[in-house]
Amino acid sequence: MPVIVFAVIALTMPFWFPLVGGYAGLDTKILIWAIFAIGFDILLGFTGYLSFGHAAFFGVSAYVTGLMLLHYSANIIPAMIASVIVTTIIAVMVGFLTLRRSGIYFSILTLAFGEMFYAAALSIFSDWTGGDNGLTGLPTPELFSMPFKENNVFYLVAVLAIIGYYIARRIGNSPFGMMLRAVKSNQTRLEFTGLDVKKYKLSAFVISAIYASVAGSLMVIYEPYVATEFVHWSTSGKLVIMSVLGGVGTLFGPMIGAAFMLYFENVISAFLQEQWLLVLGLVFMFIVIFLPGGFVEGAQRLKRAIAGKAGDGNASKGASE
C-alpha cells in the first residue's frame, strides 16, 4: 500500500505540483534526491552508521555518466550502467576500510574519503573533471537515438524512484533487513552469536552507494552538467539534514525531507529572501529538539491525538446513552 501511495504521488507530480508553487524540473530534482535519501536511510536508518561521505558516490557516478555521454555515446543506458559499476567498486573498497570503525570514527573516515575524492576532482583528475568549472559541454542525452529530456526524464526518474522505494521496503521487511536492524540495536551481542557482522554492514554500505550512484547519474541526465558541488561534503550534509527532517529509519521520511528542503530552498526562499537559511535552521532545530523522529513522528503524534479525541468522544457518547 505505501508503494502504491508513493507511486500515485510521484507519477502525478506534473499535474499538482504547480498548484503549490512548484515549477517544471523541480519535481524531477526532488525525486532524484528522494532516491539518494532512500539509499542513505538503508545505511543510517537500518544499521545506524552515519556517513558524511556519500557525496563521493553521488559525484563519482555523475562524473562517470558525464564522461560516458561526452566521450562514448549520448545513450543514457551505457552511461548509467558504467556509473553504477564504477561506484559499486569504489564503495566496496571504501566500505571495507571505513567499516572497521563505528560511531564518530566511521563518520570522520567517510568524510575524509569524500574530501579526498573532491580534492582529486579538482587536482589530479582535473583534465577529466573540468576542475573548478565542472564537466561542461555534454550532449543532450538520448535513449535509442531519441532526445531524452523534460517529461521523458521526469517519468524515468519517477519510475526508478518507485522501484527504488519498493526494493528498499522489501529489504527492510526481509531477514536481511532484520539483521541490519540487529546491527544497529546491539552489534556486539550479534557478533557473539557467530554471525559475520562485517558482511551485513558492507552490504548495506554498498547498497546505499548504488542508490547514490543512480541518483548521481540521473542528475546529469536531468541537467547535462557535472558540478564540483556534487562531490563536495556539503552535498553529504544536505542529505543528512533531509533524512533527519523527514525521519531516519522510515524510508518514506527521508523522501519527505528531501521534498521539503528542495521546495523550501527553491520556492519558499523567494518569499523569505536572505533569511531563508535562518528559518530553515530554526525548523531543523525544532525538529531535532521536539520531533527527533522527524516529520513522520509528527504525523504519527497527530494521528494518535486525533484517534484519542475520537475515542474520548465515542466513550462520552456511550456513557451518556
Image (cartoon, rainbow, N blue to C red):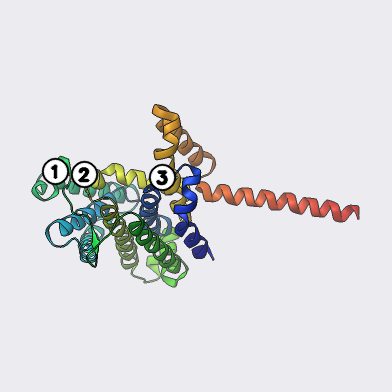
- In the rendered structure, the answer to whether residue 69 lies left or right of residue 40 reads left
Structural distance between the alpha carbons of marks 2 and 3: 25 Å
Q: Secondary structure at mark 3?
A: loop
> Which residue shows up at 44% across the image and 72% down it?
175
The N terminus, quarter of image: bottom right
Residue 126 lies, in percent from the top left, at 11, 46
Can residue 248 be seen here? no
Q: Earlier in the sequence, mark 1 or mark 2?
A: 1
Residue 158 lies, in percent from the top left, at 40, 60
**Amino acid type shown at disc 1:** Gly
Mark 1 nearby-residue class (10 Å; few <14, some 14–19, many ≥20)? some
Which residue in the rendered view is the most extreme toward the top?
274
> Which residue shows up at 84% across the image and 51% down it?
316
- In the rendered structure, the answer to whether residue 217 lies left or right of residue 170 reads left
**Amino acid type shown at disc 2:** Thr
- Dot 1 corresponds to which residue? 131
Vertical order, 51 against 159 (above or below): above
Structural distance between the alpha carbons of marks 1 and 2: 7 Å
- Dot 3 corresponds to which residue? 23
Circles 1 and 2, Cβ within 8 Å, touching? The answer is yes
**Amino acid type shown at disc 3:** Tyr
Nearest the viewer among 239 and 48 is 239
Residue 72 lies, in percent from the top left, at 13, 62
Q: How many marks?
A: 3
Q: Secondary structure at mark 1?
A: helix
Can residue 67 be seen here? yes
Nearest the viewer among 71 and 108 is 71
- Dot 2 corresponds to which residue? 228
- Res 88 quadrant in image: bottom left
Closer to the eye: label 3 or 1: 3
Q: Secondary structure at mark 2?
A: helix
